[in-house]
Amino acid sequence: ACHMAYHPSLLPAASWSDLMAGLDAHFGENAWIDAGDAAEIEAWLTAHAAETVDTAPARLFVRTDPAAPATLTETPAWERLHDDLPDGLFARAPIFTRANCAACHADAATGRFSPFAIEIPKETPK
């Protein structure tokens, strides 16, 4: 996998639908799955999308413009929340990419992103 499975509350339903409709060209990769599985996953994602959850991150990300690319790390909310972090931080081990939320956010899988659950890991030797 190229990135962690994002919590569905981090994007609005329209963004999840757009992502699922374009799995054959998912950010330069072919992530195609059969139509039945895709429909089931899309239904779950949209049922638990940002509009349906009352958490601080969901309230921020629900405002994502559906016409904009659904790259979570390029949304105005994500950029504003991370603008004080140097670009090099995201390239180093063990983070490696902006898409690796779980590297710093212990509760990323829950979608909560509490400020008390943030720990920026020390760089690991190569």
Image: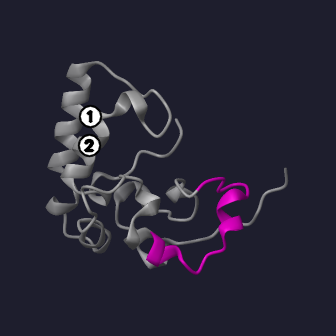
Q: Does the magenta stretch include residue 92?
A: yes
Q: Which of 65 and 47 is in front in this view?
A: 65
Disc 2 marks a residue whose amino acid type is: Asp
Position in image of residue 49 (x %, y %): 21, 54
Q: Is residue 37 left or right of residue 71?
A: left
**Residue shown at 46%/76% (left/top)?**
81
Q: In x, y percent, where is residue 5?
A: 41, 45
Which amino acid does the dot numbered 1 rest on? Ala
Q: Which residue is drawn at 84% across and 55% down?
A: 125
The secondary structure type at the circle numbered 1 is: helix
Colour scheme: one colour
- Residue depicted at 25% across the width and 24% down the height: 37
Number of residues whose C-alpha sits closer than 10 Å to that of mark 1, classed few (under 14), some (14–19) or many (20 or more): some
User: Which contiguous range is marked in magenta?
Assistant: 79-97
Which labelled disc corresponds to residue 4? Answer: none
In this rendering, is residue 58 above or below 30?
below
User: Can you give x and y, in whole percent of width and height, for residue 48 in the image?
Assistant: 19, 51
Kindly identify which residue carries mark 1.
21
Q: Residue beneath label 2, please?
A: 18
Up/down of 13 relative to 57, above or below? above
- Residue 23, position in %: x, y? 36, 31
Residue found 32% across the figure and 34% down from its top: 22
Question: Which residue reaches farthest right?
Answer: 126
Residue 68 image-quadrant placement: bottom left
Residue 119 within the segment the image draws in magenta: no
Can the viewer see residue 93?
Answer: yes
